[in-house]
């Protein structure tokens, strides 16, 4: 595709439900990143992958959050037992390689998650 | 720890006026610095970046930014703002040894006719 796509664009769920957010990176991009952006804040790093390997998950706030990229392309961020504090914009980015100096990260439009 | 401060939450300028958005960072060494723009419904788009060398960097859409080590600043400027520049602007520090960005809280720009 032309850019990073994310689905759904908007998700409203009830507290306690599980949600899965999808990211489809630019074709050929090795690295994929997840960020969370609360209202009035900048994006905050959650995790990233090189191919299918999750290289860093230090930003995941707790064990209710998980991410996978089983075939090194599409990635899914899953939030179990959602809580109201999980409400935010979840952004995905991809790049040709790792290292912010050499490889620009291209961001998707985000998924706006609202937990009621 | 790395951090980025954007002291202005919201700025309003008239079309054709000059613009300066402030960014201050905290980092242990010379950082990698970035400015991103976020338009409604769009993803973040890279405006410009600084790694080393010339402290005045040029970006897309007529933007420039100047790295000032003594002030730990990386302010974004544009000599003449267009209505289409209305958006949210984020300053970010990139880890040299890693792949993470640390973003500021953003500055929302409104352009009035």
Image (cartoon, coloured by chain):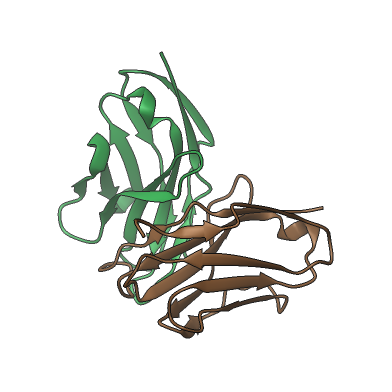
Chain colours: A brown, B green
Q: Could you tell me which quadrant the C terminus of chain B lies in?
A: top left
Task: Provide residue A101's location: percent of width, then percent of height.
Answer: 28, 67
Please state which of residues B70 and A83 is positioned toward the viewer in this rendering.
Answer: A83
The location of residue B73, given as percent across then percent down, is: 35, 48
Q: Residue at x 56, y 66 (%)?
A: A22
Rendered location of residue A115, percent (x, y): 77, 55
Residue at point 54% right, 54% down? Answer: A110
Q: In the rendered view, does A36 fall on the left or right side of B54?
A: right
Residue closest to the eye, B14 or A116: A116
Residue A77 in percent (x, y) is at 60, 71
Instruction: Tell which of B44 and B78 is nearer to you.
Output: B44
Q: Residue furthest left?
A: B54
B86 to the left or right of A65: left
Residue under the point 31% across and 74% down: A97
Residue at the (51%, 65%) spot, across then down: A23
Q: Hey, which residue is sitting farthest top in the picture? A: B113
Q: Is residue B91 visible?
A: yes
Please identify the quarter of the rendering in which residue A25 is found. bottom left
Which residue lies most toward the front here? A1
Query: As drawn, is B77 to the left or to the right of A54?
Result: left
């Amino acid at each position: 595709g032309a850019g990073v796509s994310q689905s759904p664009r908007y998700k409203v769920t009830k507290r306690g439900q599980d949600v899965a957010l999808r990211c489809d990176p630019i074709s050929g991009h090795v690295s994929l990143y997840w960020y969370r952006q609360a209202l009035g804040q900048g994006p905050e790093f959650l995790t990233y992958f090189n191919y299918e390997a999750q290289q860093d998950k230090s930003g995941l706030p707790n064990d209710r959050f998980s991410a996978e990229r089983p075939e090194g392309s599409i990635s899914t961020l899953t939030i179990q037992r959602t809580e109201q504090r999980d409400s935010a914009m979840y952004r995905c980015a991809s790049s040709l390689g790792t290292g912010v100096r050499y490889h620009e990260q291209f961001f998707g439009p985000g998924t706006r998650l609202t937990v009621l | 720890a790395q951090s980025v401060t954007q002291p202005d939450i919201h700025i309003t300028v008239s079309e054709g006026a000059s613009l300066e958005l402030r960014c201050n960072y905290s980092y242990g060494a010379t950082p990698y610095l970035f400015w991103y723009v976020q338009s409604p419904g769009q993803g973040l788009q890279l405006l410009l970046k600084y790694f080393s060398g010339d402290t005045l960097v040029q970006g897309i859409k007529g933007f420039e930014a100047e790295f000032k080590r003594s002030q730990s600043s990386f302010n974004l400027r544009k000599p003449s703002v267009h209505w289409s520049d209305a958006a949210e602007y984020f300053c970010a520090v990139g880890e040299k040894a890693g792949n993470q960005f640390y973003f500021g809280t953003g500055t929302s720009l409104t352009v009035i006719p």
